[in-house]
Every structure is written in structure tokens, then in C-alpha cells.
Image (cartoon, rainbow, N blue to C red):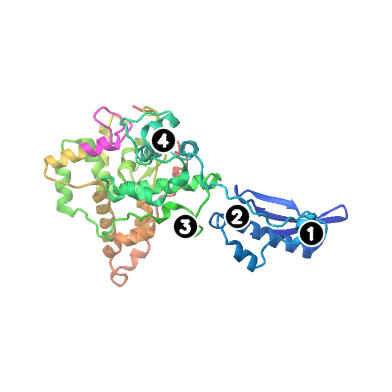
Amino acid sequence: MASIFFRKKRATGLWWIKARSAQSRILVRSSLQTRDEAMAALMRRRIELELELRRPELAGLIIPAALLAELELAVPAAFEATGQNSDGGSLAPTAPVAPQPANSLKVADAIACYYRHCQEENSAGWLKNKISYLRAFFGSALVDSITGLKGKKKTRGHFKGESVGEISGVAIRDFLDGKEIGKKTKRHYREMFHDFFAVLTRYGLYTPTNMISPNPVSALPSYLEKSGARITFLNSAQISEQYEALTDRDSLNAAVRIMIGAGLRRSECLWLRKEDFAPDLTYMRVLYREDEDTDDANSLKTGQRPVTIVPALRDFLQVYLPTVSSDWIVPSPRGVRWHKDNFSKALRHANRTAGLSWTCNEYRHTYATDRAREGWSLFRISKEMGNSQAIAERYYAAFIAPEWLQPASHSMEAPLPPVEKIAGHANSGGQSS
């Protein structure tokens, strides 16, 4: 779309136009060199039509010459003779334009652009994941030569094309269908590829060929789990059995108790430090922070938040915290921060030894269902867990007692700890042990 406006200057004035360029989509403001409003409106309409004709799906169409002649779409003789309009301006007629090859950008240049963008926008952890996805699709040799990094494993890659235009939704789906990975991982790949094309489009390096679905990844399945809202969680007897299985594993036991008692995600639990707990242990803080030992930073899925410490967890922390010599609340055997994969491996081994198979997701579901039974509203549960209320309602609505059975006091819940209290700790990483 284009728009026109009148700009005055020294008692005279001209009509100007504002529109986006056909290729780079840069916003252009320029004079139409006329004071005639009617002529400016006609020129605006002409420019809109010219821009429309250069859309990718229209620019390359070939219309039979006989039909052009029948529709009288040949260039008017008046234009051929003078090259000017009746007002003497330089408004030229539409001339045949040879279609330029769309999306001929080299894959290597596209990867380089996307990598530079992600370096600025993503944490080290997310950047590492995206690079591993790029290696699997394009091959480690190409990706590593661009990023200057080296992966642990050499991969040949799935895609063999040379230009971005050859990367279609079908090619990406064939790649994902050929990998022995779960739906959750496929969804992560899908999100990365969608972001890849979105970034290239914003930089003007990729031209959508389908105006209805500009991003080719939009055609792929969502890869969402089809289990509906079915969840698994621990009852009181199973919680006791889980704690008993980790009695001699202080660090693992503390992590599981925090996930069950506070609803934290695995990564949020592993990044907790002593200063994250209020002195009276009424609440804890989930914060952004850095690990100076590994030069890594946590990447919170839903941002910083305070989390109420329920009485059962508070009783445990009062005994446990004084025994921790590391600044990390859940230290590894070496006294440093657990790597998430190493933590899960150790927890899985300890549980298998005891004949258990619980996971961190089930601990989180246990927290939510317990709070719902206690009368917490879905709004409060979602805030404490760092979820949207829609997600909380999807999974936990059935555990909330009907309104007509709830005492009136439940409508006046204790307020959450003020977020301002955690502002001063937003970037405090402390000294790594």
C-alpha cells in the first residue's frame, strides 16, 4: 500500500508519496513532483499497481501474446513516441521486466547472517542448540567453517542444495521424518527453521513466494503431543517413596524436593543460589544469572519471578541449607553447578536402582495438583510456576474444587511476594565455587 501527502515549502508545495520498495521493503518517502492532487492520486494508484505486479507469484507469469492483444494491453502509441505523460512528466509506461531469480542467496551466506543475528539475540545455551540443529541439516563441515566452532560429532547433513530458495517445507519435513527423534525435539527443530526464515525475511534476504504462508515452515505439522491434557503426578505415598530412594543423595534429594515443593523447572532448580532465598524462607527468587566458571548463562523460559515456599519445603530447607558448602543450592559431586544432562543421568540412575521412573515434569505436575487441591486459584498457580493461565487451566482445572464448594476465604488469597524485591538481584551471579 502507498499513501500520499502534501508538503508545503516557501509558499509552494508538492505532493509526496510513502511506500515500501519492491525488493528490500525499505520505507521510501519521495516527491511526486506535482501540485495537482488528482494527478498525485493517479500516480499513487499506478505505483501501487507496479508494486503489485512485482510480487513473486505475479512477476514471473507469462501471459499469451494473443490475449494481451485481445485485451488491448499493448504499450500505447503515445507513450512509445514521447515517453512522457500528457502533463510532460516522466511517468513511464509499464515495460516488460525479466523476472529475477528469487531467493538465490547462497546457503552459506544465509547461515552466516542467521548466526550473527543469534549471537546478539540468544543466550549461549540457546545459540549452542541452534548450531547443533543447523549442523544436522546443513552438515557440520559447512556450519563449523562459518561459525568457527567445532562439534563433538561430524555430520554429513541432509540438505545438498546451494541456495535458500531450494529449502522448502517438504525438504525440512523429509529431514525430520528421517530422524529418530520425539515430537518435542521435532518441534524444537521446527521453531529454529521458522526463526531462520523469519530473520532472513526481516533482513531482506528472503522473498516469500506464498503470500498466504510467507514462512515455508508454516506448512509443517505443529508436532504437539496428542495426549491432550492427561498428566501424571505423584500421590503422597509415592512422594514419600521418592524421598526415601534419595536419602543418601543429598543434592538429588534437595533438587527433587524443590521441584515438588516449589514447581520449578529442572534448569531453574539447578541455577538456584543461597542468596535466592528470603532470610525467613517465605519465598525464593528465580533469576537470570551467569556462571563464571563455565562462562554460561541461564535462559529462563518465562522470565524472573518470586515463588512461595510452602511449609513442607520450608521445614526441609531449614535443615538442608546450613549443610551446603557450595554457593549452588544443588551442587554436583565436585561442588559446582550441575549440567542439566548430567543431573538427569544421575537422577535416572538413582531412581532405577530403587525401581522408580519419575521425571522432573512429573514433579512439577505434582506441585500444581497439590496446590490446586489446597484451594489455590489457577491464576496464582500459573504465576508461581511461570506458565500462562491458559496452560494451567488446560492441565490443572479438574483439580480445583467447584466454586460452590469453596469457602469464601479462598477468594482472598495471600498476596505473592512483591516482584520489586528481586529487581536488585537481576544480574547478581555471585562468586562461583
Q: Which residue position is annotated with label 2?
A: 54
Residue at screen point 33% across, 64% down: 410
Which is more N-terminal, label 4 or label 2? 2
Residue for point 36% across, 46% down: 189
Mark 4 crowd level (few <14, some 14–19, many ≥20, 10 Å Cα): some
Measured as percent of width and height from the top left, residue 388 is found at 39, 56
Q: Which secondary structure is most common in the magenta stretch?
A: loop
Sequence order check, earlier mark of 2 and 3? 2
Q: Nearer the viewer, residue 270 or 113?
A: 113
Residue 267 vs residue 229, the one in the foreground:
229
In the picture of the structure, the residue carrying the numbered disc 4 is 124
Q: SS of the residue at dot 1?
A: loop
Q: Nearer the viewer, mark 2 or mark 4?
A: 2
| Magenta span of residues | 327-345
Task: Report the Cα–Cα distance between label 1 and label 3.
Answer: 39 Å
Does the CB distance between marks 2 and 1 fall below 8 Å? Answer: no
Q: Is residue 304 left or right of residue 209?
A: left
For badge 3, the amino acid type reads Ser
Which quadrant of the figure contains the N terminus?
A: bottom right
* Nearer the observer, 126 or 14: 14
- Select label 2 or label 3 by which is in front: 2
The image quarter in which residue 289 lies: top left
Query: Distance of mark 2 from mark 1, alpha carbons?
Result: 22 Å
Residue closer to the observer: 39 or 232: 39
Query: Considering the numbered disc 2 on the image, is that residue within a helix, a strand or a loop?
Result: loop
Q: How far, Cα to Cα, is label 3 from label 4?
A: 31 Å
